[in-house]
Image: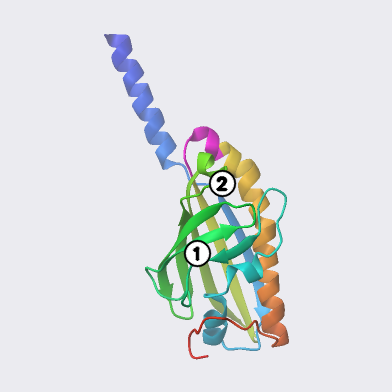
Amino acid sequence: MYYSLTSLLIFVNAIHAYSQKKYPKAEVVVDIRSTLSLKETFEYMVPMDLEHIFNEPYKNIPSIDSTSNQEAWFTAGQKRVIFFNDGSTSQEELLSVMPSSGFTYKVYGFTSPLKILIKQINGSWVFTETGEGKINIKWTYEFIPKHFLARFLVKTIVAKRIKTPMQNALNIMKKELESGNLYQYSRRVGNW
């Protein structure tokens, strides 16, 4: 009986310690010199068509073919399906939009092999003015793994590999904002 109770307490403590650990994150930060104001830069980037900025596969991360949303991605509570070039999909929900300062969302319901490892990804973007006409953009992915082994694989493989497509996406938007040659949306957004 003593060993059973001790084993149970050790197990409960291990579960508690596991639940207190931070989830693996991938962060990408970029400074841009935008031809637009902070407000206009924000309104340009939030509803960006994903197939425009994730247009190249990277290692085992597929490119994005399209999304299911018919209106601009700019209102908290909106949901859409993301269609990848390998035939897989995921769900995405816009959780909050704080005008000119940031937005948050979650990605879940993976049909790719990620469904074995990841419960969901929490995404956040933070926009701040840094002076001299520059805008700092911090984009964070926080991976919520399904189990302990998944935490290790996500941290050592997935989180590291996703940084390159994230940086490429930011570089595409940075180039457009700094050149003034802006991508033309097929959906109406903001004051445009």
Query: Which quarter of the image is occupied by the N terminus?
Result: top left
User: Disc 2 marks which residue?
Assistant: 112
The boundaries of the magenta stretch are 145-151
Q: Is residue 142 above or below residue 99?
A: above
Q: Residue furthest front?
A: 87
Q: Is residue 172 magenta?
A: no
Horizontal placement of 104 versus 175: left or right?
Answer: left
Under circle 2, the secondary element is loop
User: Disc 1 marks which residue?
Assistant: 124
Q: Amino acid at mark 2?
A: Ser
Residue drawn at x 66%, y 59% as measured from the top left: 63
Q: Position of residue 75 (x, y in %)?
A: 40, 75
Q: Position of residue 90 (x, y in %)?
A: 50, 55
Q: Amino acid at mark 1?
A: Ser
Q: Is residue 149 magenta?
A: yes
Under circle 1, the secondary element is strand
Q: Is residue 53 above or below residue 57?
A: below
Q: Is residue 141 above or below residue 16?
A: below
Q: Position of residue 152 (x, y in %)?
A: 58, 37
**Marks 2 and 1, how far apart at CA:** 22 Å
> Label for residue 169?
none
